[in-house]
Amino acid sequence: MRLMERLKAETHELHARAETHPFQRAMIQGGLERGAYMDYLRQMLHVHEALEGALARHGDRTPIREVVDAGQYRAGVIREDLSFFQREDDGGRVPGTMRAGTARLVEEIRACDEAMQFERLLGMHYVLEGSTNGGRFIARALARAYGLKPGGAGLRYMDPYGESQQERWGEFRRRVDALGLDPHSCDRVVEGARAMFEGMCGVLESLGDAWVETDGSVALPLRGAARGATNGQ
Ligand code: HEM
């Protein structure tokens, strides 16, 4: 089985877990308050900074060299999206601190970086790069919800490639499958991908935790109409 096929098959249930998390569901329904979306961006900025820093440090090492290029890095567009909203005078409404789930994931990335586990780092990158597939759909919902231009400022992180999405993802897939890694190295890539998906679930959990009510139920900050639809699921 090709490595990309393995990655998809062996992370399938984790993708389903991430995709159906109430925070992600609220996002794709366009139901999340803008401040909560900004908080998501802030958490992802920490994750991308950690991973992209590691990838750049080890950019001359196999298998990072053959697959990763700086055009895939997204910390820069997250900063642009956040400053766009801050210009719109929404800044500072949501604390920018790193949530517990984000801190755990960042720690895990740093451990792979320090131990020079290049295959694991590539597996982690696969997850964030692959998330642009669904991100494009989510961006459309967010554009409608927040009155933004599809693919424009505020949405660049979710939809970085626009019309080139399929082409970019096809290229990423080709590069990974051309690596010809031995089975042991492929196992490490899959482990990294699973760790990133699990870490992402932790980030989403932590984002939800910010709005746990005193009775233990979670009340995500939802926009008016979506409140009844997603709350408590
Ligand atoms: C509402 C949330 C989400 C939706 C609707 C969604 C949807 C999708 C869709 C439609 C694809 C393309 C599937 C295909 O062409 O076979 C995809 C692929 C992918 N998504 Fe998501 N996604 C969501 C959240 C996430 C999250 C949070 C992550 C991780 C950070 C993620 C990571 C991936 C990856 C790695 C792939 C590539 C799978 C592969 O072909 O190897 N997704 N997603």
Image: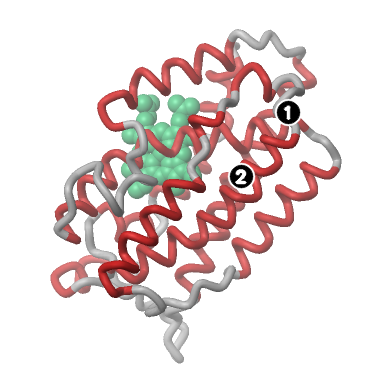
Q: Is residue 109 above or below residue 130?
A: below
Q: Secondary structure at mark 2?
A: helix
Q: Locate the C terminus and report the quarter of the image it occupies.
A: bottom left
Q: Which image quadrant for residue 27? A: bottom left
Residue plotted at (66% across, 63% down): 103
Q: Does the residue at mark 2 contact the one at mark 1 (Cβ under 8 Å)?
A: no
Q: Is residue 5 above or below residue 129?
A: above
The circle on residue 119 is 1
Q: Which image quadrant for residue 208? A: bottom left
Residue 165 shows in the view: yes
53 horizontally vs 88: left or right: right
Ligand 1: which quarter? top left
Q: Locate the N terminus and report the quarter of the image it occupies.
A: top right
Q: Is residue 228 above or below residue 130?
A: below
Measured from the top left, where is residue 88 in percent x and y? 26, 68
What residue is disc 2 on?
196
Residue plotted at (44% across, 52% down): 78
73 horizontally vs 107: left or right: left
Three-letter code for the amino acid on which mark 1 is drawn: Glu
Three-letter code for the amino acid on which mark 2 is drawn: Met
Q: Residues within 10 Å of mark 2 (few under 14, many from 20)?
A: many
15 and 96: which is toward the camera:
96
Q: Is residue 16 above or below residue 86?
A: above
Q: Secondary structure at mark 1?
A: helix
51 and 190: which is toward the camera:
51
Q: CA distance from mark 2 to mark 1?
A: 13 Å
Measured from the top left, where is residue 119 in percent x and y? 73, 28
Measured from the top left, where is residue 136 in percent x and y? 30, 39
